[in-house]
Each structure stands twice: as C-alpha cells, then as structure tokens.
Image: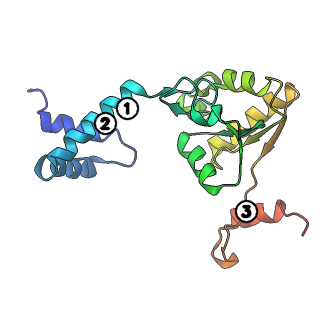
Amino acid sequence: MKPPSSLDELIDALRCLPGVGPKSAQRMGYHLLQRDQPGARRLTAALGIALDRIRHCERCNSFSEEVVCAMCHSPRRDASLLCVVESPGDLLMVEQAQCYTGMYFVLMGSLSPLDGIGPKDIHLDRLLQRATDGVVREVILATNFTVEGEATAHYVGELLRAKGVRATRIARGLPVGGELEHVDSGTLSQAVRERREV
C-alpha cells in the first residue's frame, strides 16, 4: 500500500474544518490547485502567522496577539460585569449587538461528558478566579441554548452561587420581527414562561 499522495493529504487536511465533508474538501482542494494558487499560498502564510502569533488573553481567554487583549485593557468597559460565552465567535456576536459594555470570559467550549469535556477543559478554574476577584458584581451566563450549553450554564451558576457571586442567564424568546405562527413550540413556550411586565 502506497502512502497518500500530496493531493489526498490536502483534501484530508481540509476536512478538519467544520461542516466540510469529503466532497467539499475535494472541491476546495481542486479549486486552490487549479484556479487560485496565489490564494492557496496566502492561506498557507496567514495560517502559519496566526498559529505563531495568536494566544489566549490572560484575562478573558479569547484570542489575542498580546498577553492581555485590547478589550480587557479598555477603561471604557464595565469591569463589574462579566459575560461568559462559549467561543470567540459568540463574543463577537454580543459585541455586534451593541447591547453590552462589560467584560468577557470565553470558555472555548462547553461541558460535554459524552465527548470527554469536563470543567478543566473549559477553564472553569480561571473563570472562578476572575469572577471572585472582588471587582465582578454579576456574571452573565451567555452559553448557547443547547443541551451542553444549558448544562454548562447550570454548572457554572451553581459554582458561582456557592462562592457568593451573582449569576444571571440570558433570556430566551421570540426573535425581533418574528411571527408566532413561524416559531417552534419550544421557543414559544420559553417566551411565555420568561414573560415580563410591560
């Protein structure tokens, strides 16, 4: 049996990307080799530079080229609020909504015992240290509304309450501009349960 060719190796390497199956990886590989070799070289260089330069911020655990990221250094942020998210992408979505001006902590995942992901794997020790620093008054749990995200929020909430730290959870409900007839029953029932005064 001969070793895989360099093309097979490229296609196999592209499959590490989320949502990329064998056919998509094959199309990408052929495209880069046939139609966009400069793009392939740029991708190679950018990936190498990113791997060399990017690390985790010591305060929020998000990606940064510095030891402490610009957001954590900013005097404009409210240090008494700490929003916990699962990924840097989630942090970016909260920032783009322009509804929050506090600090963040990025878990880089969620608890998933079936996948072997426990509290140490998502940096809960660092989160607890940050949340109990005497500056943070409230921790907002903004994990995803998946089974793993809910389990993570519950687990973290219990840890924080045991330490005397106020923990809140972002609300669920109907999307802005959404119509009731197009909403799934789970979302609708949650919106009814989490209703508020008008």
Instruction: Estimate the x, y position of residue 45 in percent, counting from the top left.
Output: 26, 34
Comparing 92 with 29, the one in front is 92
Residue 29 shows up from this direction: no
Label 1: element kind? helix
Identify the residue at horizontal 58%, vertical 34% (top origin). Answer: 70
Q: Mark 1 highlights which residue?
A: 50
Comparing 82 with 34, the one in front is 82
Instruction: Estimate the x, y position of residue 182 in percent, counting from the top left.
Output: 63, 75
Q: Please report whichever mark, 1 or 3, sits nearer to the chain's N-terminal start.
A: 1
Name above or below for residue 192 compared with residue 105: below
Label 3: element kind? loop
Instruction: Estimate the x, y position of residue 124 in percent, counting from the top left.
Output: 67, 25
Label 1 to label 3: alpha-carbon separation: 37 Å
Q: Mark 2 highlights which residue?
A: 46
Identify the residue at horizontal 17%, vertical 52% (top origin). Answer: 31
Label 2 to label 3: alpha-carbon separation: 39 Å
Locate the N terminus and report the quarter of the image it occupies.
top left
Binning the other alpha carbons within 10 Å of mark 2 as few (below 14), some (14 to 19) or many (20 upward) gives few
**Could you tell whether 50 is left or right of 178 in the image?**
left
**Could you tell whether 15 is left or right of 37 in the image?**
right
What amino acid is labelled 2 in the image? Ala
Label 2: element kind? helix
Q: CB of mark 1 within 8 Å of CB of mark 2?
A: yes
What amino acid is labelled 1 in the image? Ala
